[in-house]
Amino acid sequence: MRRLRSRRPVLILPGSPVVFPNADDADDEGLVAIGGDLSSERLLAAYEQGIFPWYDEGVPPLWWSPNPRTVIERGGVHVSRSLRRVLRRDTFRVTFDHAFERVMRECGRRDVGTWIIPEMIEAYVELHVRGHAHSFEVWQDDVLVGGLYGVHRAALFAAESMFHTVTDASKVALVYAVTSLFSTGIEVFDVQLFTNHLASMGAVEIPRSQYLSRVRDATAKPVSLTGLELRWEGPPGAS
């Protein structure tokens, strides 16, 4: 049973100070605030507090922190036998930060609605230019066939969306992203909301209170992605 909302979502006026209410005070649905803007400063402040924007074109930004949250733990990504065969065959080539905007636009090509509207693309491309948002690209014969993008804050990586136009390409992107990022020192790999597809890849739900505590710890630990080594298997001896 959902608990009653302990606080109404806060109204944020465009250009107002970059402040969010405590996400712990939201109900399980998780609507924390309404309005504001998608400035880099506001976006980064949101992710550092376990909050993300998710809304449709034509309405003010909506800021969310649902309960529970979904993450993939270190060593927790599931690589099926069939996917392992795909990875070993080198069917795909994977790159990092080679085509951020293209990946984001492809993620927004959905048959039924998308929150990846033009103003979101503009805002996250700016985050990418500033070094705070990153993409993993999957190529087949030099054609972009899959990918994933997200926001990096210290030891937190908040994956936003992924896409594929060829079978298994998004799974390959996810496996490479999780394994490569944990190898750099990332401690929280956030995928926001539970889906059966993510669960099949090893994602698990945790209470929002635990998630927010882990985010506070993670964002206090600097992690650089410079020189990131792409890998789909952990280092020898890793669990």
Image (cartoon, rainbow, N blue to C red):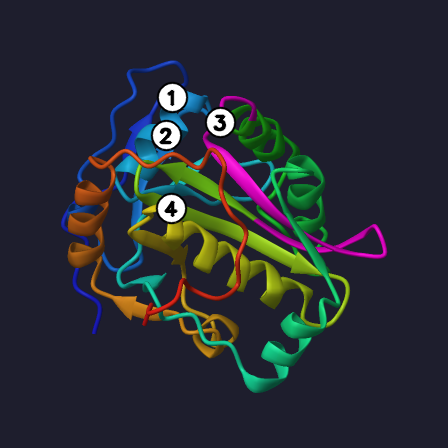
Amino acid carrying mark 1 in the image: Glu
Amino acid carrying mark 3 in the image: Gly
In this rendering, is residue 228 above or below 168?
above
Q: Which of 65/183 is in front?
A: 183
Q: Earlier in the sequence, mark 3 or mark 4?
A: 3
Q: Earlier in the sequence, mark 2 or mark 4?
A: 2
Question: Which residue position holds label 4?
Answer: 184
Q: Secondary structure beneath disc 1?
A: helix
Q: Earlier in the sequence, mark 3 or mark 1?
A: 1
Please provide the residue range marked out in magenta. Answer: 129-148
Q: Secondary structure beneath disc 2?
A: helix
Q: Earlier in the sequence, mark 4 or mark 1?
A: 1
Q: Is residue 38 left or right of residue 103?
A: left
Q: Say if the magenta span includes residue 147.
A: yes
Question: Which residue position holds label 1?
Answer: 41
Question: Which residue position holds label 2?
Answer: 44
Residue 219: in sight, yes or no?
Answer: yes
| Magenta-colored segment: predominant secondary structure | strand
**Spot occupied by residue 148 in the image (x, y as percentages of width and height):** 58, 51
How far apart, in angstroms, are the residues tagged by discs 2 and 1? 5 Å
Label 3, residues with CA under 10 Å away: few <14, some 14-19, many ≥20: some
Residue 26: in sight, yes or no?
Answer: no
Pair 2/4: label in front: 4
Q: Which of 30/73 is in front?
A: 73
In this rendering, is residue 193 above or below 89?
above
Q: Say if the magenta span includes residue 62.
A: no
Q: Is residue 96 left or right of residue 169?
A: left
For the point 53% across and 57% down, the residue is 231
Amino acid carrying mark 2 in the image: Leu
Question: Which residue position holds label 3?
Answer: 131
Circles 2, 1 touching at the beta carbon (< 8 Å): yes
Label 1, residues with CA under 10 Å away: few <14, some 14-19, many ≥20: few
